[in-house]
Amino acid sequence: MPEVPLDVPRIWVEFTDPADDGQRFRCDLTWLTSSWTCIFGSGCAGIYADRPDDGCCTLGAHFTEEADYRRVRDVAATLGPDEWQYHDTAHAKGFKRDSWTELEDGVRKTRIVDGACIFLNRPGFPAGAGCSLHQHAVVQGLPATMLKPEVCWQLPIRRAYRTVEQPDESTYLEVTITEFDRRGWGPGGHDLDWYCSGNPEAHVGREPVYRSSEAELVELMGQGAYDQLVVRCEAHLRAVRSAWQTGNRQLLPLLVHPATIAAHDDDPRAVATGQVLRRADREPDETAGDHPGAGSPGGDARSR
């Protein structure tokens, strides 16, 4: 399926961080209530056509800071050769920094081995294809946020910051939570052969993003802010349900991510509401407290 345009109508919501009144969240409800899910191993075409089995792991992962590097290092040191295909490569001269990482334009990242990230187990490996760090998280029952490089577990959620100056010259920090679309990769993002966030093929999740990526969002925002986000996402889905039920279906393209709509074009009702809105069709008391463990390892196909 073709990807939807990068610039689509979006509904945003803003609220003050309950943990910091000098900070405000600006959240993309269109993305967070979409039905995107990781389809690695279930239809993902990979970002490069000649390496479809890599998913988005071809380029390796840049570390955001020293703490990110150290966390991944400590986890990688515990992986055995039965979990990590390139274990022996990383340990050939002792588990040293340059044995599993490399510099790119002065920034440290995971090393590329045989054309992709050193942590990517390839098809045919007994433990299965996919990120060895993610697979380890699944086995240990831990959230991927504790084990994988930050850029890996955040994708395709994007967090950005800017300082906003008010007319009275006061300022606050604005934290944006939105879709990590092709532009998030920099200029080279437009050259990727395939990308999931705007592709209907990946908008087949059983839960909206704000539910399936709960662990990631809590890590990015804090529990209090995430709880506030849930209230607003549920209210947005009720508005979509109302538009469907009252015959104002011409409003749906303004409310629902176009890739979610396109993903269900074989079902007239689903194309209008998006599969994630099945939750919104329930009565409010049926959805209250309905927080599955999605977003933690095993909650989706995210073995990248």
Image (cartoon, rainbow, N blue to C red):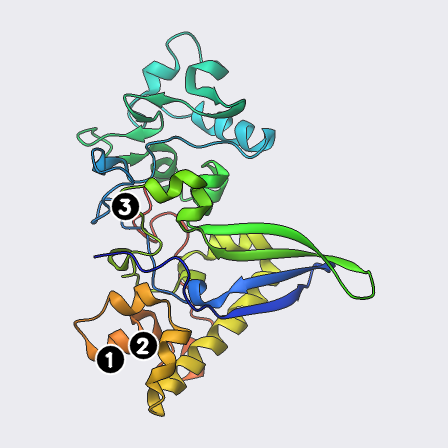
Tell me which label, 1 or 3, sits earlier in the chain: 3
**Quarter assignment of residue 110:** top left
Question: Would residue 222 appear left or right of 89 to someone viewing this image?
Answer: right
* Residue type for callout 1: Arg
* Residue 64: image location, x then y, percent: 55, 35
Vertically, is 146 above or below 76? Answer: below
Vertically, is 94 above or below 272? Answer: above
Give the number of the disc on residue 269.
1
Given residues 94 and 251, the one toward you in this image is 251
Q: Quadrant of the C terminus?
A: top left
* Residue type for callout 3: Trp
Residue topped by disc 3: 194
Residue topped by disc 2: 273
Given residues 71 and 150, the one toward you in this image is 150
Question: Would residue 61 appear left or right of 205 to someone viewing this image?
Answer: right
Q: Residues within 10 Å of mark 3 (few under 14, many from 20)?
A: many
* Residue 55: image location, x then y, percent: 29, 40
For the point 48% across and 53% down, the residue is: 215
Q: Residues within 10 Å of mark 1 (few under 14, many from 20)?
A: few
Tell me which label, 2 or 3, sits earlier in the chain: 3
Q: How many marks?
A: 3
Secondary structure under tag 2 reads: helix
Given residues 134 and 163, the one toward you in this image is 163
Closer to viewer: mark 1 or mark 3: 3
Question: Marks 1 and 3, Cα distance to the nearest angstrom?
Answer: 28 Å
* Residue type for callout 2: Thr
Question: Marks 2 and 1, Cα distance to the nearest angstrom?
Answer: 6 Å
* Residue 266: image location, x then y, percent: 16, 72
Q: Quadrant of the N terminus?
A: bottom left
For the point 41% across and 7% down, the residue is: 93
